[in-house]
Amino acid sequence: MKICAIGCGGHATTVHGPAQKKYALLHPGAILAACCDPNASRAEDYRQRFGFARSYQDEETMLDTEKPDAVCIVVPTTLTRQVVGPILKRGIPVMLEKPPGCTSAELEELIDAAATGGAPHQVAFNRRQMPVMLRAMERLNTFMPPKSVFQIDYEMIRCDRRDEDFSTTAIHAIDGAHFLARSPFRHAVLSFRDFPDLGPTVAGIELEVECESGTRIRLNIQPVAGRNYERISLHGHTKTLTLEFPVVGPQGSGAILDCWENDAPVYSFRSEDSEEDLFGFYSETRAFLDAVRDGRCPHPTLAECRQPVALMEAVRNRQSHVAWA
């Protein structure tokens, strides 16, 4: 299986390149054929660092020459639609970084492109592949079916993040809650607290979401607090499950999962900060490439991201309400 990579910038170099290198080392049939970036020196550095055979500056030239079996794409969000769309139309399997487009309209263009090409694709939401999240889903699927979960509380707290558009980070929490709920959203109410002295777009964000299963979700997203962390609680009759995710940074930590029933602990999982693939980046790469190799559909697909993208867009546009028919 020939693998190509498009985008050799900071995020690709930090997490995707190491994952691609590891996959090739563990799977002898996987060939890191080529990488591509408009910056020639950046592409060549990526090639040497992670073991790709060749580097290019133009993706069309690379694809025509290499004819890859799979492509991993990590480009700025503003370029996702124009870079990913033509490759999907070619029928080449693609893994693309989140979010899959800046708006719902861009996402629909990509969904149409994928339908035209007919190839498998996967959106890279790494939280879905964190070891702690996989353990949590095992517990939920065994002991707490979707309709039995009354409430999900999700806190995404960041320290002094004054991004011009924090919605593209907030979508991690939105998708994480959507994934854990295992049920489509029915409607959402959004509220914002602006901090104009910190920047024209800086705000605390709160969402209240009701799912078709009856589960209620409360999302508390605070980008300019004093610490980086993510915590989740899920509650059902006599059962509670709590997660704490690791966060990259000097105060990063491991991951924690605790399960309680009738006020007694019944299960606990600890993932140390030194544990390999703590953040799920290798697992998401492996899930995609294994699915392509085996002829399976990887997840999440573009179509499965419609509701998270709609809420991301609502956060950016300061909408007060979103409803699905």
Image (cartoon, grey):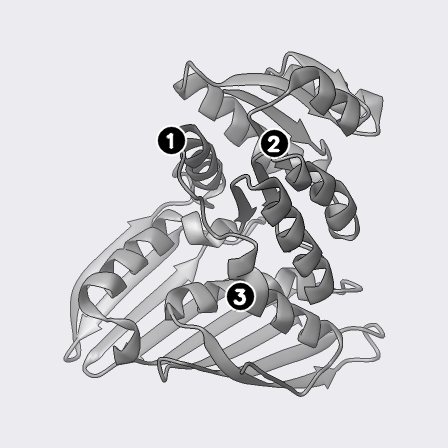
Q: Which of marks 2 and 1 is nearer the N terminus?
A: 2
Q: Which amino acid does label 1 sit on?
A: Asp
Q: Which amino acid does label 3 sit on?
A: Ala
Q: Which residue has dot 2 on it?
A: 71
Q: In which quarter of the image is residue 41?
A: top right
Q: Which of marks 3 and 1 is nearer the N terminus?
A: 3
Residue 154 placed where, x, y %? Answer: 47, 72
Q: In which quarter of the image is residue 52?
A: top right
Pointer 3 with pointer 2, Cβ within 8 A: no
- Write the residue at 83% across / 29% down: 38
Q: What element carries label 1?
A: helix
* As drawn, 32 above or below 124: above
Dot in front, 3 or 2: 2
Q: Which amino acid does label 2 sit on?
A: Val
* As drawn, 256 above or below 131: below
Q: Which residue has dot 3 on it?
A: 173
Q: Can residue 199 be seen in this view?
A: yes
Q: Nearer the viewer, residue 37 or 48?
A: 37
Q: Which residue has dot 1 on it?
A: 294
